[in-house]
Image (cartoon, rainbow, N blue to C red):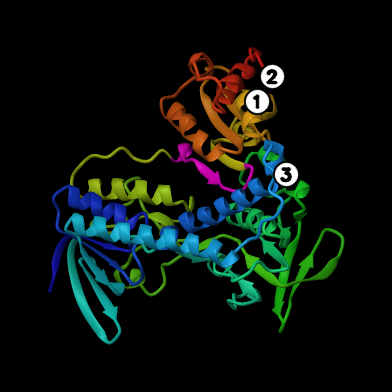
Amino acid sequence: MPRFDLAVLGGGPGGYVAAIRGAQLGKKVCIIDKDKLGGVCLNWGCIPTKALIKNAEVHNLVKHADKYGIIIEKFKVDYKRNVKRSRDISTRLSKGIEFLIKKNNITHVNGFGRLVSSNSISVKKGTKTQIIEAENIIIATGARPRSFPGMDFDGNRIISSKEAMMLEAPPKDMIIIGSGAIGVEFAYYFNEFGTKVHVMEMMDRILPNEDADVSKEVETNFERSGIIISKNMKVSKIEAMKTKVKVHVDGQRSKEIIESDKVLMAVGVVGNIEDIGLEDIGIQLESGAIITDQFNKTNIKNIYAIGDVCGPPWLAHVASAQGHVAVEHAFGINPIPIDYSNIPGCTYCQPQVGSLGMTEEQAIQSGYEIQVGKFSFQASGKAMAVGNTEGFVKLIFDKQYGELLGAHIVGSEATEMIAELGIAKALETTWENIATTIHAHPTLSEAIMEAAMDAYGQSIHQ
C-alpha cells in the first residue's frame, strides 16, 4: 500500500500547485485525478477560452484594419482551425504540467479518488482499485457548470461552456443565460464570429458583481456591437426541440417564449463534492461547499480543501494561492492567510474588466466616507494610439486616510493593469502614493495615476 506525506485529490490549478509546493518542501507527494492534469482551467476554462477570445480580437482587428491604414479587401475564417488552436494550446499546457509533476518526483495516480478514512483514499480506474495512504490530504476536486431543473444540459441544444468551445461552426443565433464572466466572454466571442447573441440576466444589470459603472460601460459596448441584452428576466424552462430550443422567460411585464439555435447556460458553477467520501468521514459542509479555516483546514486536522469545492470566489488564482497556504500550514510553516478583500477578478471580453476590493456601493454601505477618482481612456494618448479608447479607471478611497478601498478598470488591457492596484492595496497604499508614483508615458497605466489624482481634484488630463 503506497504511503505518502501528502496526497492531493484533484489536479487543477489548486491541486497541482499544492503538490509541487509539497515536493519543494521535501515531502513525498502523490496527485490523483481521473482526467488530464490542469483541471477545468487548463483544459476547458481559463486558458483555452482566452485563446478563442484572442482569435475573436484578431478577427475584429482584421475587419477594422482600414482605420490603421491597412486595406484588407477579402479574408475568410477557418473556424475549425480557430478551435484547433485553442485545443492545441490546452494540450501543450497540460503536458507541461505533467512534466512539472515528473520533474518534482511527484507520483501521478490516474483514476477516481474517494476518501475512505482521514488517512486513506481509494482510487478506482476501470475494474482496478488501489488504496493510497497519506499523512495529509488536500481535496481539490474543482467544480462543474451549474444547471437547474427543467434546464439540464443535453450537449447539443442546451450546452455548457465546454460544448460551446467545441462547436464546429458558430450557430446562427444563441441565447446565453447568465451574464457573469463566462456569459459575457462567450457573448463577445460568438458575436464577433457572426452569431446573433441574446444575453438574459435575472438581475438589473450584466456583470452584477462588478461596480455599476463598469457594468454600464460593458453593456453599452455590447449593445453597440449588436448583442441583445435582456435584464430582469427569469428563465422558467428550456425545451430542446429537433432544430431549435425554446426558452420560457418571465419578464417584468409578461411571459414569453424565445427560440434560438443554441442555449448556453452560464449561471455559475457547483463544487464537485459528491461521491468522494466527505460524509463518510465526517467532513463538514455548508451550502454545497466544504467548510475550512483561514489556512484551508477542514474540521479534520490533517485534511485540507482548496479551490472551487470551498465555494466562492471560484477563481483559479485563488485555488493556487490556497494550495500554497494549505501545504505550508500542513507541514508546520506559518503562512500568511489570504486577504480575500484583495482578490483580482478579471473578465476577458472586449473591453476587458479587472477589479478588486469594494465597489462604490459596497464602500458606502460599509460606512466609509469616500473619494472617487475616475479617468477615461478617451483622454489617454496611448489608448488613442492603439485604437482602443473604450472604458476607464475608477478608484475608490477612504476620505479620512486616503486608503485604497477598491479599484475597477474597464478597457482593452484591464486584466493586465489590475495587478498594480493589487500590490498597492496589499501595501495599504494611499491615493497620494499612487498619484505621485511616476508612470511611464505614454502608457495605458497612466490612467491609474490620473484617476488617483482625480479623486482629490488634481487630474491634469481629465
Residue corresponding to mark 1: 374
Task: Name the mark nearer the viewer: 1 or 2.
Answer: 2
Mark with earlier residue (3, 2): 3
User: Does residue 231 appear in the picture of this structure?
Assistant: no
**Residue 38 image point, x, y percent:** 37, 60
Instruction: Give the magenta-colored segment's residue range.
Output: 340-351
The foreground one among 135 and 89 is 89
Task: Name the disc covering residue 165, or none.
Answer: none
- Disc 3 secondary structure class: helix
Quadrant where the C terminus is found in the figure: top right
Residue corresponding to mark 2: 462
Judge whether 449 appears above or below 367 on screen. Answer: above
Q: Quadrant of residue 250?
A: bottom right
Mark with earlier residue (3, 1): 3
**In this rendering, would 1 be left or right of 260?**
left
Q: Are marks 1 and 2 in contact (CB under 8 Å)?
A: yes
Mark 1 Cα shell of 10 Å, populated few (<14), some (14-19), many (≥20): many
Residue corresponding to mark 3: 221
The foreground one among 24 and 328 is 24
CA gap, disc 3 and disc 2: 21 Å
Callout 3 amino acid: Asn
**Residue 322 image point, x, y percent:** 35, 48
Quadrant where the N terminus is found in the figure: bottom left
Residue at horizontal 30%, vertical 73%?
114
Confirm whether the magenta stretch covers residue 109: no
Callout 2 amino acid: Gln
Callout 1 amino acid: Lys
CA gap, disc 3 and disc 1: 18 Å
